[in-house]
Image: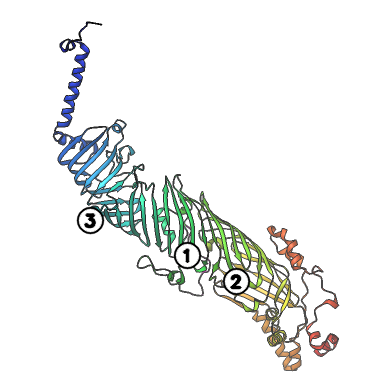
Amino acid sequence: MSNATPPSFAQLRRTPWVKWLVAVVAAITLLALLVIFFPWDVLRGPLNRYVSERTGRHFEITRKLDVKLGRTTRVFADGLEFANPAWAQDRNLVTAESAELDIELSALFHRRIEIARIALRKPVLGLQIEPDGRRTWALGRDEGDPQNIPHIGLLVVDNGSAHFVASEHGADILTEFAIDTAASAAAHPMPMTFKSKGTWCKEPFTAQGRTGSVLTINSASREPFPLEVSAASGTTAMQANGAVASLATFDGADLSFNLRGQDLSTLYKLLGVVLPATPRYALRGHLLRQGDVWHARGLNGKLGNSDLVGELDFDRSKDVPHLAGRLHSQSLDFDDLAPLVGLPEQPRSAAAMPAVAPGGKVEKVVHDKGHKVLPTAQLDLARLKAMTAEVDYSAARVVNARGLPLERMSLRVVMADGFLRLGPMKLGVASGSLAGSIIINGNTNPALAEAHLDARALELNKLFPRLKITQASFGKLHGDIDLKGRGNSVATMLGTSSGSVSMLMGRGEISNLLMEFAGLDGGEIIKFLIRGDKNVVLRCGAASFDVKDGLMTSRAFVLDTEDTIIYGSGGISLARESLDLTLRPYPKDMSILSLRSPLTLSGTFDAPKAGVDKGALAQRAGFALALGALNPLLALASTVETGPGKDANCRTVLRDAASTDMQAKVAIMAQEGADANNGAAAPADQRKPTFWQRIFGAGKPAAAAAATR
């Protein structure tokens, strides 16, 4: 066993490293005592001068300063004033009865200003941002330098106000907020109420709602704070409730919303989302934000009298935002399409729901004979470049189509790099389809437009549902439209367009009464009016136009039935919206009381006029009157139609009328439209009886002919 005794304290005191340890402990103890009991308020004056000098604006802690040092240093200021830059509208950035800031010291060594929490008592805030990036809350002489913008985690406030100005967005909003003491006492999750008033996008703006007293500004990792808001800007109103994780970016937003307004296209000015013009609307759904992507789920509502459901995603992560989604209408009211093509909201659409703001009245359309039919609303070329889009839309049923045979529709809207493409597009028309695409190039001014549409199997009796005389007719119409034009409206695009328009029809049936009216065959008309109408076989039909600079000039125009063949010529001006067509009927059988004369289609799209060629009719009527002066039977003889019409060669007609893109269809069309003899006249024993044979019997054509001599 060792007999060594431990060293005494006196001996340890003589050891060098112990001396150093005692000195360090004493220094730390002294420093701690200084930190704890240091009169920080003596630094208030130097601190006020230092901050004012570094920021270039007045800063003052007016009553008392206290500091608690640590990794996160807490600074308490009793009475605070911090001025705004000279260019700002409000004198001060903030005034408050007191302020408490939790500052991350380590971030200061990296030239970052990180404030984990700010608690303000009775604050008055003056917040302003300029188009060049300057912000009043930048804490340095360079208000546009991102390094001078503090990163704030939480904001705790009670009663106060905030004035926000952003000239680039047309925003000037004053918000007043207060703690509802009764709600706070009851541990209400949203004890703070707020009211806002001013302008947003230069439109009147109001808002009110409730939220928590602790607001998350940038710290998305913290619990989202609850929010209820009801806001209105111009003719748009929204109610929303849910939670938001970050007030600065709205990241983590999880909100149920109700949105209504006068026109969806106004959301571009409010939110930067390019949407089509619509009648007044009401939509509800669920809104989520994940990073830079907004998700609208469970969309359900109405546009005028049309229902709408679906979902949309709006991605702002790239330089150009992107919109994608699917929308569907079970029933699309045709009146609700009026704003889309530049026409005023229709009264039926307006009556479907009340206006959001006073003055949301339906524009009264004054109708006159010179009224333009083609839409003249100007295309906003800037919006074509404001974002990209891929949205699919479909309507199971189209109602109230005003006599148009539109039954259903589906299309994809694609917008990218200044181009707008509507297609693939498929419209259900007259139990057939009209498919294709429309492309608009907005990179030039005026814009370039192309339309490529293919009509398949349109049923004749459904093309004109309001004309009783065609309801018993049947047959299938095919065609295509290929046009290119330049302009910033539908009217100018069509008015400058070039290309071709072709419509072909195979075998079918058409009203005989209609054909006899076309031929002005009085004898046949009287007979059918007495006995009733019946159909006549339609062998084939074709109408094709060459289009150049908005003028449609007929290349082929033939309608061939067993009774009559009609040839047409003339043109249609898309620029002047006028008609100049002449139809010449040639009956194939003999008839009396016929005043056959060319038919004319003239006037404008808005006020078309149909009639006979008065000169030709007057000439034939005058000839009949002249003969009648000599002998009444001669006047009757002058109205006898000898039936000069001959069957058309339908295969040739269809081939000549078809555009280049339709040549592949000619064989099918010819099979539908041509008879077994491929256009040749039928043998004598198979020909349809002539008028005289039906009246006098098959064996008396010679006697009948003699009676007319």
Say which of marks 1 and 2 sits in front: 1
Residue 374 in percent (x, y) is at 53, 66
Q: Mark 2, mark 3: which one is toward the viewer? A: 3
Q: Position of residue 52 (x, y in %)?
A: 20, 38
Q: Which residues are magenta?
A: 367-379
In the image, 321 versus 226, the foreground residue is 226
| Comes first in the chain, label 1 or label 3 | 3
Choose mark 1 or mark 3, whichever is in front: 3
On the picture, is 113 further left or further right than 81? right
Q: Amino acid at mark 2?
A: Leu
Magenta-drawn stretch contains 211: no
Q: Is label 2 in a helix, a strand or a loop?
A: strand
Q: What crowding class fits label 1: few (fewer than 14 Cα within 10 Å), some (14-19), or many (20 or more)? A: some
Name which of mark 2 and mark 3 comes first in the sequence. Answer: 3
Q: Position of residue 462 (x, y in %)?
A: 63, 72
Name the image quarter holding residue 223: top left
Secondary structure type for disc 3 = helix
Residue type indicated by callout 1 = Pro
Magenta span: predominant SS is: loop
The residue lying toward the viewer, choosing from 702 and 406, is 406
Residue 182 - label: 3
Q: Which residue is mark 1?
A: 339
Can residue 177 be seen from the camera position used here? no
* 377 inside magenta stretch: yes
